[in-house]
Amino acid sequence: MSDTRSTTASARSGRVRIDDRPKHLATRLETGDIAVINVADLDKDSAAALVAAGPVAVLNAQPSLTGRTAALGPRLILDAGILLVDDLGQDIMSLREGQEVTVTGGKVLLESTVIATGKRVEDEDLEIEVADSAALFAGFEGAIEDYLAKDGATVLRGEGVPQLHELGNRPVLLVTDASDAAGELRALARWRAEAAPYVVAVDGGADVALKAHLTLDAVIGDAELMSEKAIRKASSFIVRVGGDGLAPGSERLDRMGIVYDSVAMSGTSLDAAMVVAAHSDASAVVTAGVSYGEAELVDAGRSLVAPAFFSRLACGSRLIGAHAVAATFRPRPRGWTLVMLAVVAVILMGVALWSTPWGNDLLYPITSLFTSLPHLAGGTQ
């Protein structure tokens, strides 16, 4: 790592790491690197993955916010104190991995020469007027028909969906790699201790689960987005095969000699995990790091709306967020707790009776017996 890096407000320098896929890029980033991406409307989950890796700057060939969605991703970047420069053009993607660049304002310099100019994103830029989300859902009926024609049998009837091994009647806990997943797992600590859920990690959520000292009963998703330790710790692995026939992460599993199942459906790894849990007859599906609002659906993009909707529909009333569980869960009293409460109640009742004349008369035979025991014991010696 270079000693010339600077994190001053005016200029930031570091090695570039380049990838069209921000989540995959995050697995290669080191603290102090500069991330180079090519994504219009940077979504929240991708931004969270980048932030967790600790770059000093994010350079985007495209606009990170176009007004189509709320600026959820860019806001995470700026809140973390990371410089974000937008709309640098496709030439920025021609940089070589590991080259040292300096970012000043909206300019990117390589060996003191400006190679690209974009717009530095500031806090005030995030307050943009967002387009009516109704436009995203316009013509949604046709998208639903197309989606159900391809994936309806899988998502709604469970055809070709692998089962979760040794699930029994346990609830499923889905753990994602979202920025708030770790906090939600902490909030679920008492519920986890009592419910002993079946843990299913999604993509980088495998490492989140390991850090929370959870057993990985199953991992579903892209093996490229998690550590080798997480892959080795998983009791079972399921990859998602998309409509293009590609199974992200399967090549890495093959190289490692890991046996895995697959589920063929479009959407995301989270969608696949929900479908697998639903058709494994989980008693409940509790999610850590999953948001369900309109803003999140719009943020994901039109092509992912149908998979997100129908995967949640497959779970039905069994699907519940971590915050709701933590807010409503009341632990059952344990056996020894009940015994102690009973003992205390008897003692208090005895004290109350002893303090009354009729209670004193009632308890007199018992107290007399205890006071006479030493004399009886002495007489037998």
Image: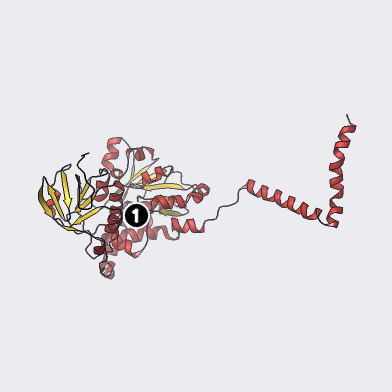
Q: Position of residue 326 (x, y in %)?
A: 48, 56
Q: Amino acid at mark 1?
A: Asp
Q: Residue furthest left?
A: 113
Q: How is the image coloured?
A: secondary structure
Q: Is residue 218 left or right of residue 29?
A: right
Vertical placement of 331 versus 231: above or below? Answer: below
Q: Quadrant of the N terminus?
A: top left
Vertical placement of 115 versus 125: above or below? Answer: above
Q: Position of residue 294 (x, y in %)?
A: 34, 65
Image point (67%, 47%), residue name: 340
Q: Which residue is mark 1?
A: 271
Can you see residue 247?
no
The number of discs equals 1
Q: Is residue 216 left or right of residue 110?
A: right
Q: Is residue 168 left or right of residue 246?
A: right
Can you see residue 146?
yes
Residue situated in front as seen by the camera: 2 or 15: 2
The image quarter containing residue 286 is bottom left
Q: Position of residue 247 (x, y in %)?
A: 27, 46
